[in-house]
Image (tube, grey):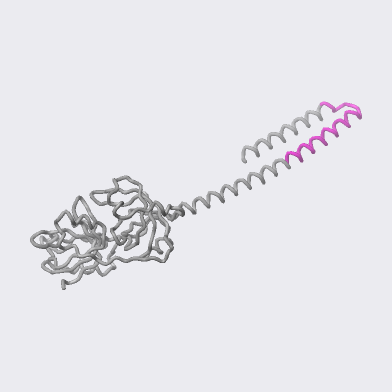
């Protein structure tokens, strides 16, 4: 639009120069020259009016086009902010068994139920989800804050993404989703996997909501004074209140490291407080999601209680 405006201005300038030149040539001329001058001025005015009309039309057309473009951009932006994508093919949904057998980097479509979620950040959320047959860890799923608020435990969603693995943790990433509004909900009960600790079969329960019972709290490390402590802020003790909590528990002579993931259960939750109050030697029961890290179980714990 700016280029068109510049062209119209140059056109008007040229017309005025021509008119002035005409006036200089007819300084001593006869009446016919005067008539010619009047005609030139009339022509100039007509040309100017035509140019102004053309400029107004160009501006209106350009502004209209620009407004339409802006509206289209706004609509596009509004659509891109959310993660819900209408039209994920329901016929492409696979079972958990098919998902487990699928190779890494395979595009997958699953229907699953939200069990818990990490904090919403930059229009993304990480979800712990599960159906009746298995669990799916959905990493950084694009969603609006309003969509995130709707993802209460039991909510059914259809997810399309790629099966991936990071340090042993199998997940769905680069995903889109849509809510499945069929009234169906599901909240998994914690499955006791205590007997599977230290065995290859434990990985079959990866990402599920599980429980561990009758385990003994061991020293997680030492404080600044060299005293043994029952938990650490971050894996190496470098953190502070509000960071992840790491603690060790044992069973039958084997020790395992469990975590309170602060994005899942922050320092205002009961489980965060419970772990901070642990004493070495306590016997406890726990529930959480069977996360995996560096080829070892690293459960994200959501509940700690004294052993029954």
Query: Whole-percent x and y of residue 285?
Result: 18, 68
Q: Is residue 27 magenta?
A: yes
Query: Whole-percent x and y of residue 282?
Result: 13, 69
Q: Is residue 10 left or right of residue 139?
A: right
Q: Is the residue 217 above or below the residue 294 in the image?
A: below
Residue at 62% across, 46% down: 65
Query: Whole-percent x and y of residue 259?
Result: 22, 60
Q: Is residue 117 left or right of residue 211?
A: right
The residue furthest bottom is 308
Which quarter of the rendering shows the C terminus? bottom left
Q: Quadrant of residue 146?
A: bottom left
Q: Is the residue 12 above or below the residue 288 in the image?
A: above
Q: Magenta span covers which residues? A: 25-52
Q: Is the residue 207 above or below the residue 278 in the image?
A: above
Q: Is residue 300 left or right of residue 78?
A: left
Q: Main secondary structure of the magenta part?
A: helix
Q: Quadrant of residue 134?
A: bottom left
Query: Whole-percent x and y of residue 15?
Result: 75, 33
């Amino acid at each position: 639009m700016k280029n068109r405006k510049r062209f119209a201005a140059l056109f008007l300038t040229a017309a005025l120069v021509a008119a002035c030149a005409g006036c200089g040539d007819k300084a001593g001329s006869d009446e016919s020259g005067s008539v010619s001058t009047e005609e030139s001025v009339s022509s100039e005015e007509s040309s100017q009016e035509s140019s102004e009309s053309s400029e107004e039309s160009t501006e209106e057309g350009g502004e209209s086009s620009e407004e339409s473009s802006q509206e289209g951009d706004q609509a596009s932006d509004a659509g891109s902010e959310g993660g819900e994508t209408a039209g994920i093919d329901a016929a492409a949904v696979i079972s958990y068994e098919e998902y487990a057998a699928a190779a890494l980097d395979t595009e997958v479509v699953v229907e699953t139920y939200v069990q818990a979620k990490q904090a919403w950040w930059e229009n993304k959320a990480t979800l712990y989800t599960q159906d009746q047959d298995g669990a799916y860890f959905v990493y950084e799923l694009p969603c609006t804050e309003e969509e995130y608020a709707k993802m209460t435990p039991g909510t059914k969603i259809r997810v399309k993404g790629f099966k991936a693995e990071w340090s042993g943790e199998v997940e769905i990433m680069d995903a889109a989703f849509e809510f499945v509004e069929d009234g169906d909900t599901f909240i998994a009960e914690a499955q006791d996997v205590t007997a599977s600790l230290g065995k290859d079969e434990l990985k079959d329960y990866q990402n599920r909501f599980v429980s561990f019972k009758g385990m003994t709290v061991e020293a997680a490390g030492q404080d600044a004074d060299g005293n043994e402590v029952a938990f650490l802020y971050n894996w190496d003790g470098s953190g502070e209140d509000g960071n992840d909590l790491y603690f060790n528990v044992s069973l039958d002579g084997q020790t395992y490291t469990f975590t309170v993931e602060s994005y899942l259960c922050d320092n205002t939750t009961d489980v965060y407080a419970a772990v901070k109050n642990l004493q070495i030697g306590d016997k406890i029961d726990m529930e959480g999601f069977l996360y995996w890290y560096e080829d070892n179980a690293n459960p994200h714990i959501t509940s700690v209680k004294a052993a029954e």
